[in-house]
Image (cartoon, helix red, strand yellow):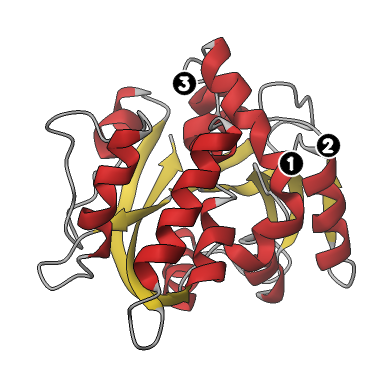
Amino acid sequence: MSKEREALAKTFDSAAGLYLAARPDYPAQLFDRLMRATGLQAGDRVLEVGAGPGKATLPLAQRGLRITALEPGPALAARAREALADYPVEIVETSLEDWHGEPSAYDAVVAATSWHWVDPQIRYAAAARALRPDGHLAVWSTAHVFPVDGDPFFAELQEVYDAIGEGQPPGEARPAPGELADLREEIEASRLFDVVAVEHFDWTIDYDVESYIRLLSTFSDHIAMAPEDRQHLFGEIRRRLAPRKDGRLRRDWGAVLNVARRV
């Protein structure tokens, strides 16, 4: 991982107090599909990569799984311990790159909106090492998607991002629901896994202005902004939403669940 990406990855710990409530919940259907595709059952062992404060850990634990959750951020790890105190979850304050746990011990390795932060040179080998024969890898991330009838607020706000030098690169895609890229080719290229399921999930959340600003305050690129730029952006969001009768915006979310079996 480049030094710049490594620095961005470390920003999340500063938002530990906001993350659990501000980030969107993953759809229950995603976890149901994960359980079916992997064949996981209550009591099975799962290694979670980049657990954060337990956003995906809790739904997995509620399905009876025994989880070792890796989280390098001390503040995020502390939040996860609080949230999961009533479940058979061990929070280990480390990254997958630095973890040296028992090999071939887990029924599944799971990464929720964290896999892209793991060193691409070693992540599939590290996951395969942790898994028992025929164990499964399940990876997904959330992203902003843009339906044809989506809220125009985000297109209008781009001029603010452009003004502070944080605009989208020319030609960058604005994927519609169901159009997010999957990891099929990357997983197969590792020669360590066979893809068994790829499925898209889409959902919508309405935000008032302060809840949306709290969400943005958990994104690495927004945390890393110059304070004056971030203040200007948040001020413009408040100003531009104020004329709306309900003061709210609608954000469309998407995720792609990738499930693969260790070969």
Q: Nearer the viewer, residue 30 or 245?
A: 245
Secondary structure beneath label 1? helix
Q: For this view, does 57 lie left or right of residue 2? A: right
Which amino acid type is marked by label 2? Glu
Disc number at residue 173? none
Q: Nearer the viewer, residue 57 or 107?
A: 57
The reply to whether the C-beta atoms of the residues labelled 1 and 2 are less than 8 Å apart is no
Secondary structure beneath label 3? loop
Which amino acid type is marked by label 1? Ser
Q: Is residue 84 visible?
A: no
Who's the residue at 89% across and 67% down the image? 85
Whole-percent x, y for residue 210 in the image: 56, 68
- Which residue is label 2 attached to? 93
Q: For this view, does 3 lie left or right of residue 153? A: right
Image quadrant of residue 237?
Answer: bottom left
Whole-percent x, y for residue 37 in the image: 41, 62
Who's the residue at 87% across and 57% down the image? 81
Mark 1 vs mark 3: which is more N-terminal? 1
Q: CA distance from mark 1 to mark 2?
A: 15 Å
| Mark 1 vs mark 2: in front | 1
Mark 2 vs mark 3: which is more N-terminal? 2
Who's the residue at 74% across and 50% down the image? 16
Q: For this view, does 188 lie left or right of residue 118? A: left
Q: Is residue 74 visible?
A: yes
Q: Nearer the viewer, residue 214 or 76?
A: 214
Which amino acid type is marked by label 3? Pro
- Which residue is label 3 attached to? 120
Mark 1 vs mark 2: which is more N-terminal? 1
Whole-percent x, y for residue 245 in the image: 34, 88
Q: CA distance from mark 1 to mark 3?
A: 24 Å
